[in-house]
Each structure stands twice: as structure tokens, then as C-alpha cells.
Amino acid sequence: MKTLSLKGNLREITKKSAVKALRKNELVPCVLYGHGIESNVHFTLGLKDLYTILNTPNSYVLDLDIDGKVYKAILHSSQFHPLTDEPIHIDFITVSEERPVSISVPVIISGNSEGVRQGGKLMISTRKVKISAALNDLPDSINIDITTLKIGKSIFAGDINLPGIKVLTSPSTIICSVKMTRAALGAAAAAAAAAKK
């Protein structure tokens, strides 16, 4: 998985007015916690830097440089303003090579579905799946080949089988499916009628 470096600055836990002042200066309050950290690290990141990891479908392992001390971490959760949709608080969690990492990664659909070729419509239901793997085994994305996917059939999270990777998303979660369309129904009816002749 790709690594991205971000620079932050330590901050004190202060009153709401001080937090508002940070946000006015385009700084977002953040917290880092997890294995290897005795007490949570409170810091700020620039809004523009945060957008590099928030405004993308990609997932990253982060090198967080907080006042000169570097932590390896992943994005854990985000809170956004209900009106402006700007990030107002971000949580990060530390990762290491000794422990499996749980993270959501994007799903990439590839191939030309048999069902789509027959007139069906491809429906993508899930854009990301949560996985667990060793830090060095984390993929940038999960590729789903739909070449043999027929009309009325679905691919589920439980169908994903990759060495060294455990899928944490519920096995019954639909990744994608091919739905019947009027065009496909017409083609099927025409084929059935031709077969009877």
C-alpha cells in the first residue's frame, strides 16, 4: 500500500473557543492513539494536507510527522461539519509490522461481464471493503473480475479470496451484480421464440 507523509503540530487540549480559532486558520484538530502510545497525541493538520487523504477513494499508510516525531498510522474516523462539509475532527490509529492492520480499501471492477454483453445492467453496490493483513501485505485496492458474471448473479464480499488477506466486510455484502433489463428480456424472448421454430 502507498505511503503518504503528513506534517502536524502538537496542540494542547483547550476550550472550544481555541478549537474554533484553529479551524479559522484552516487547521483541523486530530488525535492519534493505538498500540505503542501511552497517552493520546493531540495535534493539528492543515486543511489542504487533509484533503489529500479525504478527497480520494484511495487508502494510505501515513507517516505522521508531529513536531519531528514520526508515527506510522492510518486514518481511523472523520467528523465533518453538517453544513460546510469541512472536516472538523480526525482520528488516526498507529500501525506496525508486528500486528495485522485493519483498513478499508477501494474495489476495482475489471472485465466485460457476460451478463452486460447480453443486455443486462451492471450495478456496483460497494466501493470499498474492509480487510486485515500484515502491513507489508496491504494492497492498494481489491480487483474484482466480472467477466463471467451473468444476468441475475452477484459477487459478494465472501467471494473475495486473496492470500494473506482476511476480508472483514460481512460475507453477505454485495459488491456488484448484473440486473435484468427490458432489452435483455426482449433479447431472451426473441431467442426463445427463434429456438421454437
Image: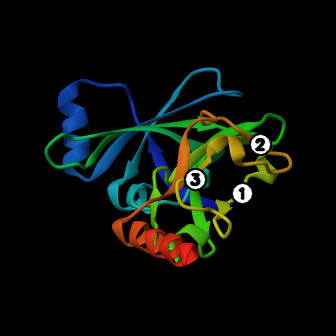
Q: Residue at x 49, y 50 (%)?
A: 126
- Residue positioned most to the top: 38
Q: Where is residue 169 in the image (x, y as percent from the top left)?
A: 60, 37
Q: In this view, does 171 lie above or below 48?
A: above
Instruction: Point out which mark residue 153 bears.
Output: 3
Tell me the crowding category of disc 3: few under 14, some 14 to 19, or many 20 or more residues within 10 angstroms, Cα based: some
Extreme-left residue of the structure: 83
Contact, CB < 8 Å: mark 1 with mark 2? yes
Residue at 17% x, 30% y is: 17
Pick whichever of labels 1 and 2 is earlier in the sequence: 2
Q: Which color scheme does this rendered protein use?
A: rainbow
| Amino acid on which the number 3 mark rests in the picture | Lys
Q: Residue 139 carries which label?
A: 1
Q: Exactly how many numbered labels are in the figure? A: 3
- Is residue 56 shown left or right of residue 39? left
Within 10 Å of disc 2 (Cα), the crowding (few <14, some 14-19, many 20+) is some
- Sequence-earlier tag: 2 or 3: 2
Mark 1 element type: loop
Disc 2 versus disc 3: nearer the observer: 3
Which image quarter is the N terminus in? bottom right
Return the residue at label 2. Answer: 133
Could you say which is closer to the camera, residue 2 or residue 168? 168
- Residue 28, by quadrant, is top left
Question: Residue 128 location, x and y as percent?
Answer: 53, 50
Is 143 positioned to the left or the right of 10 in the image?
right
Query: How many residues crowd around disc 1 within 10 Å: few (fewer than 14), some, or many (20 or more)?
Result: some
Q: What residue type is labelled 2?
A: Ala
The Cα–Cα distance between marks 3 and 1, rounded to whole angstroms, is 26 Å
| Image side of residue 195 versus residue 160, left or right | left
